[in-house]
Image (spheres, grey):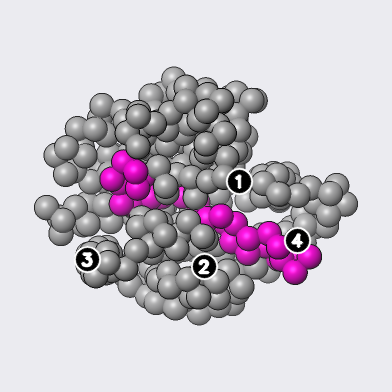
Amino acid sequence: MHQYLEIHPEVKNALAEGKPIVALESTIISYGMPYPQNINTAIEVEDIVRSNGAVPATIAIFNGKCYVGLSKEQLEYFASAKDVWKVSLRDMPYAISKKLYGATTVAATMRIASMAGIKIFVTGGIGGVHRNVIETMDVSADLTEMEQTSVAVVSAGIKSILDIGLTLEYLETKGIPVVTVGQNEFPSFYSRKSGFSSPLRLDDVDEIAKMLHAKWQMGLNGAVLIANPLPADQEIIAEEMEVHIQKALNAAKEKKITGKEVTPFLLEYISEHSKGESLEANIALIKNNAKLGAELAVAYSKGHN
């Protein structure tokens, strides 16, 4: 597989020395927020990972390879270019063989991180079962990837534009542990509350690291979803957000938006109609997750070395 991997020297050294590393996705840069907030956030997130003792490895596809760790110039390109593909698992062979520029989703980033030997991955929120799944059969590849790829996923929960209850059921069916940090209720991305109890709760990164070691050392393949609620002063109240989500879903239906275009459309619509509040919350939660992810990577590497 290494012919398709291009590992940044800083990340390569960290892998060789057993240092803590945090994988980061690139879809949030190319599709998750507008310019220049996206490039500023990408750089700040990498800085947060470093300041908490780990090495950041932002992942993307170009020149026919999976890049693990990007330069500032490469980050800038993914933040500003208009021709970047949104690459999930099914798109990877095409994007690589055609030498396209691809921003990787949760599923694709997890797979590439795993290929490189990185165990901790930080994102904003994961994909899941869509609200109108009976009509569309739209279930994110993030979930099927989590079933088979042994990488811990730190997020602010499941994106609230999705059906959180059904997604939690799906994760249970696939044997994927779901742990919430610091509270009993599962968070809903922009909000601390979702109306659903978290299946598990752990409040300490050392406890989470022990759980990861126990799972994988027993040969239980697959991810662990670690839900990290936004601090109370940065969240948007769930009921307020639901009003924006319903309007966004109606707009997507009217415009016949489908497939991998749905999530970027909804996030952009919500940002515009919440006067940028949702964008602020999105930036806050990815930074919050980066801090926890770095701390977890440090704790995990101590137990591993």
Residues at discs 4 and 3 in contact (Cβ within 8 Å): no
Which label was assigned to residue 217? 3
Q: CA distance from mark 3 to mark 1?
A: 39 Å
> Residue at the spot x=35%, y=57% of the render?
150
Which mark is first along the chain, 4 or 2?
4
List the single residue furthest toward the right. Answer: 254
Label 1 crowding class (10 Å Cα cut-off): few <14, some 14-19, many 20+? many
Q: Tell me the amino acid under the disc marked 2.
A: Pro
Which mark is first along the chain, 2 or 1?
2
Q: Tell me the amino acid under the disc marked 1.
A: Leu
Which label was assigned to residue 136? 4
Q: Which residue is identified by label 1? A: 279
Residues at discs 4 and 1 in contact (Cβ within 8 Å): no
Which label was assigned to residue 61? none
150 on left or right of 277: left
The span shown in magenta is 113-142
Q: CA distance from mark 2 to mark 4?
A: 25 Å
Q: Tell me the amino acid under the disc marked 4.
A: Thr
Residue 91 in view in this figure? yes
Numbered disc total: 4
Label 3 crowding class (10 Å Cα cut-off): few <14, some 14-19, many 20+? few
Q: CA distance from mark 2 to mark 3?
A: 29 Å
Q: Nearer the viewer, residue 305 or 92?
A: 92
Q: CA distance from mark 4 to mark 3?
A: 38 Å
Q: Tell me the amino acid under the disc marked 3.
A: Gln
